[in-house]
Image (cartoon, rainbow, N blue to C red):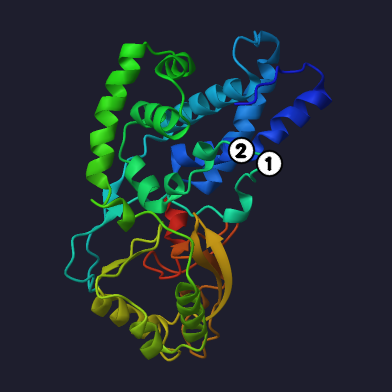
Amino acid sequence: MTELHVPVDEGDFAALVESHRREIQVHCYRMTGSYDDAEDLVQETFLRAWRARDTFEGRAGARTWLYRIATNACLDFQRRTARRPQRYEPLPGMNHGGGEPPARITWLQPYPDDELPSAEEQPEAAAVSRETLELVFLAAVQHLPPRQRAVLVLRDVLGLTAVETGEALDMTVASVNSALQRARPTLRDRLPGRRADWTATEPTDRQRALVKRYMAAAERLDLTEVATLLSEDVTLTMPPNPFWFTGRDALVEFLSMSLDANSPLFLGHWRHLPARANGQLAAGVTSAAPVRRSTAPRSSTCSASTPTTGSWRSPPSNRTCSRPSDCPCGCDRQRGDR
């Protein structure tokens, strides 16, 4: 690690923390699984660092010092929110498929690749390791208690020693080792058995072509083509939306309504842009709400466009929607389900 001492001058301090912004935000993202929360926690980290700048003694470098502050800011946040993964529950009248309900992690969000630290900004490969940004890995980490999660990230992802981890978390070395011994088996139980099943490689030309076919088919509302691109064991969740589907047949049944312009559940016309998130191919999506000709009250329509990334529908915080609580557009977020 390249270590610097914290300058007191405001301008120098700002330049220092900004040079670490991207890697600290990735760290907060690993700890929380939420892009939005990671952004907020970076600001909280830098504010705490500024307030504590005169107490920095220089025994550890500035980068290590910032990681310590960020980790504890994340732990404080997790204590306040007390978020734990739940299980999706069946919704009346909806065919979810024959599989087991997946874990429901309403705050899990994708992370855009173009906001990751560059090789120049963060040469240490461990801090931006592709597999530790996989959504499968991040979802598994959310099952760990906050302190075990912090120990695992600091030790196994960032490569800190047990002594350094203990200093960052105000724990003894024995406590660090004990937490790590409990965290690793839990994580293994939550991950697919073979590493190849959950770690992505550089996308192939075939995979890029498949994504293009999907985007084109969805834009022209071609359900038949979309169905041919789905695997038999596909699973779809849309945090914070309560909808979930296991298996192609159940998902196609849902899509047959949401892609049908004559259906009351029609989500509107989609437009896709190619993207990268969490080291994988992705699609940025906007859907224009359909114009409906009916005598139904205005309160039964959703008037906002919904930007989405991949399969995560995350309406902007200023979005308004007057549909009932089962609105398929994802606006159940307004009921605090986030």
SS state under label 1: loop
Which mark identifies residue 123? 2
Along the viewing direction, whichever of 105 and 135 lies nearer the viewer: 135
Residue 317 in view (yes/no): no
Snapshot quadrant of residue 69: top right
Could you say where residue 78 lies in the image, as x and y percent from the top left? 42, 32
Snapshot quadrant of residue 327: bottom left
Task: Return the residue at label 1.
Answer: 120
Could you say where residue 55 lies in the image, as x and y percent from the top left? 66, 9
Identified by mark 2, the residue type is: Pro
The alpha-carbon separation of the residues under discs 2 and 1 comes to: 6 Å
Tell me: residue 80, above or below residue 173: below
Could you say where residue 194 lies in the image, as x and y percent from the top left? 26, 52
SS state under label 2: loop
Along the viewing direction, whichever of 170 and 239 lies nearer the viewer: 170
Q: Quadrant of the N terminus?
A: top right
Along the viewing direction, whichever of 50 and 228 lies nearer the viewer: 228
Could you say where residue 326 lies in the image, as x and y percent from the top left? 36, 67
Identified by mark 1, the residue type is: Glu
Tell me: residue 237, above or below residue 336: below
Which mark identifies residue 59? none
- Tell me if label 2 and label 1 are in contact, CB under 8 Å: yes
Tell me: residue 58, above or below residue 308: above
80 relative position to 9: left or right: left
